[in-house]
Image (spheres, rainbow, N blue to C red):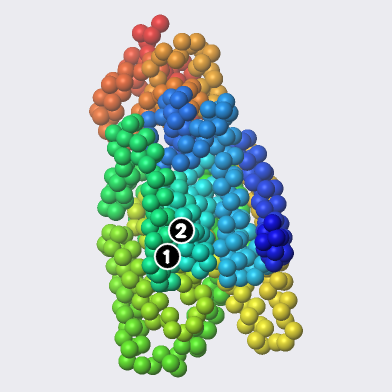
Amino acid sequence: MGKITDIIHKNKVSLLFMALLGLLMLIITYELVSIQSQIGVAYWDIFLYLNNALKMAGMGIGDTLHLSPFLPFLTSLLFRAGYVFELSLFMISGVFYILGAVGMYLLLKIRFNEYESLAGALSYATFTILMAWAVSGALDAPAISLSIWALYFTYLAVKNDSRYYYVAFPVAMLAFLTRYTSGLIIIPMLLLIFFNQPQKEEIKNGVKGIILGVLIYLPFMWYFYRQIGKPFPFISQFSASAAGTATELNPGYNLDLLYYLKNIPQYLSSPAPDNYSQLLWPSQQTPDLLAYVLLGLIITGIIIYIIKIALKTWKTLKTPQNYLKAAGVLVLGLLLIFTYGSISYVYSEVLLILWALSVFYLLRDYKLKYLDLDLMFLTWFFAFFIMHSFHPVKVDRYFITMVPPLAYGVALGIRQISSLIQTKFKNTTWISPAISLVLVLALLLSAVSYMDKMPREDEVVLIEKETANWLTNYDPEFEDRVIAAVRGPAYSWYLKKFVYTRIPGKVSPEVFQELFEEVNPDYYIYTGEGKLTLDGYTIIRQRGNVTVYEKNTLN
C-alpha cells in the first residue's frame, strides 16, 4: 500500500493531467455516441460487423466471418446479454476511443512534459478524421487504440521491465484481430526492441509474450476453422493487398500515391458538413485555420529538431566510417523514394526497416536520448503510409493508422519551439505550458463546433429502416421469404434474417440476371437512381431512392 501511495505522490501532477484528459474524453465520447445513435449506421462494412456479432451471439446471420473478429466478438457479448442494439457497438467503440487518448498521453509523457503531452493527446483525439469515425462502429479507431497501448507496453518492456512483453504482444495480437492491417505495428515494435539491444533474459520474456499472443489467437483460429474451414483467413487478404489488386468498380479506387499526403490538412481539422456520407470523407472538405496551425507545429518542430541533431553531430561525423554510414542512409532513402509505388509495398517496408536501422547506427553514439522513440514513431507513420498508398483503394478512414505519429509531431513542435525561445530569452519557461494550453483551448473549441455541426440523421438510414419496418408489416411471413437487396448487409441487420446481396452495375447485365435468378428472391430491394426492369416482378413501394420489388407469383 505504501508503494502505491509513493507512486501516486511522485506522479500526482501527471495523474491530474491524465484525469483531466479522461474527463474531457468522457464528455466528448458521450456526445459523439449520442449523435451516432441518432444517425444510426450507414456504412456498409459496419453492418457486416453487426451481423457477425449476431452470428457469434448465436442469433445467426453473419456470413463474412473471415473479417477481423475481435470487435464483433465484444459486441456479441452485449448481444447475448440482451442489448441487441447498434448502441452496443457504438459504446464499445467509445471505450476504445477513450483508452486510445489516455494511452496516447502516456506514450507522449515518456518524452514530453504534462502540458505538451496533454496537447498532443487531445490533438490526437480531436483530429477530424478520428472524430468522424471514433464511435461509428468501424474497426479503425479501436485498432489504433490497441496499437498505441501495444507500443507503450513495448517501451516499458525495453526500458523498465521486460515482463511488460507479457502484455505488449497480447495487446498487439488484439490490435491485429481488431483490424488485420494493424499487424504492421510489429515493425515499430520490433525495431524499438532491437534498438535497445535486449539481453538473454529479456529475449526469453519477449518469447513468452509472443507465446501469450499466439494463445490469444487460438480460440479465434478454432472459430475460423469451424465456421469457414480456414484457420488463417487473413492470408488471402494480405496476398491481395501485397499484389495491389482492385478494380475501378470499387468506390475507393484511386491510384494517386500522394492521396493521403495531400489530404493531411483536412484530416487534422476541417468543418463538419451537414451530410453524414460527406462527414466520413474529410478529404472532400476544406481545412480550417487550426489545420494549418497543427501542420505548422509539426513541420516546424521536425525542422528545428533535425537542425539540432545536425549541429550536434556534424563536427564528429567527419570520419570515413561515418561517411560510409551516412552514404548507406542516403542510398536506402533514395531507393525507398524512387521505388515507392513501383514495387510491392512489402519490399518498400523492407527498405523502410533497413533505412531506419541505418539511421540508428549512424546516430546511436551521439547520446540522442529519444532516438529510439523518434524512429519508432517515424516508422509507424511510414509503414502504414506506404501500405495504404500502394493499395489502389484509398479510403479516408485508413489514415487513422497514421494519426498517432502526427500527435507526436504536435507535441514535438511545442517542445522544440518553446526550447528555441528559451535559449534566446531568459525567464521564458512558461512558453511551453502557454502554447500547450492555448492549443488545448483551440482544440476543445474546434471539437465543440464540430460536434455541434454534425448531422443528426441520414436520409439513407431513415429510408432503409422505414423500408425494413414496412416490409415486416406488409408480409408477416417475411422470415420465410427469400429477400435480396443492393445493400444486403443493411437489411440483414434490420430484418434479423439473411438477405442476399445483388448489385446491378457491379457486373454485366447478363451476369447480374444469372446471379439474380440463382437466388430467385421473393422480394428485391433496390437502392439507386431510376428503376430496374425485372421480368416477373412488380414495384410495391418506392421511397426516395429505395424501391421494393415483389415476385408476381408470390401471392
Residue lying farthest top?
Answer: 555
The quarter of the displayed image where residue 519 is located: top left
Q: Position of residue 194 (x, y in %)?
A: 39, 69
From the viewer's perspective, is residue 429 above or below residue 399? below
Along the horizontal axis of the image, is 469 left or right of 316?
A: right
Locate the N terminus by quadrant. bottom right
Badge 1 marks a residue whose secondary structure is: helix
**Contact flag, marks 2 and 1 (Cβ < 8 Å):** yes
Residue at 50% over, 17% down = 471
Image mark for residue 202: 1
Q: Is residue 263 visible?
A: no
Badge 2 marks a residue whose secondary structure is: helix
Label 2 sits on residue: 165
Image mark for residue 398: none
Q: Position of residue 310 (x, y in %)?
A: 47, 86
Q: Nearer the viewer, residue 507 or 310?
A: 310
Total labels: the figure holds: 2
Q: Nearer the viewer, residue 544 or 293?
A: 293
Locate the C terminus by quadrant. top left
Q: Nearer the viewer, residue 219 or 403?
A: 219
Q: Is residue 234 visible?
A: yes
Residue at 59% over, 44% down = 94
- Crowd rating for badge 2 (residues with CA inside 10 Å; few <14, some 14–19, many 20+): many
Residue at 34% over, 31% down = 227
Q: Position of residue 378 (x, y in %)?
A: 45, 68
From the viewer's perspective, is residue 328 above or below residue 375? below
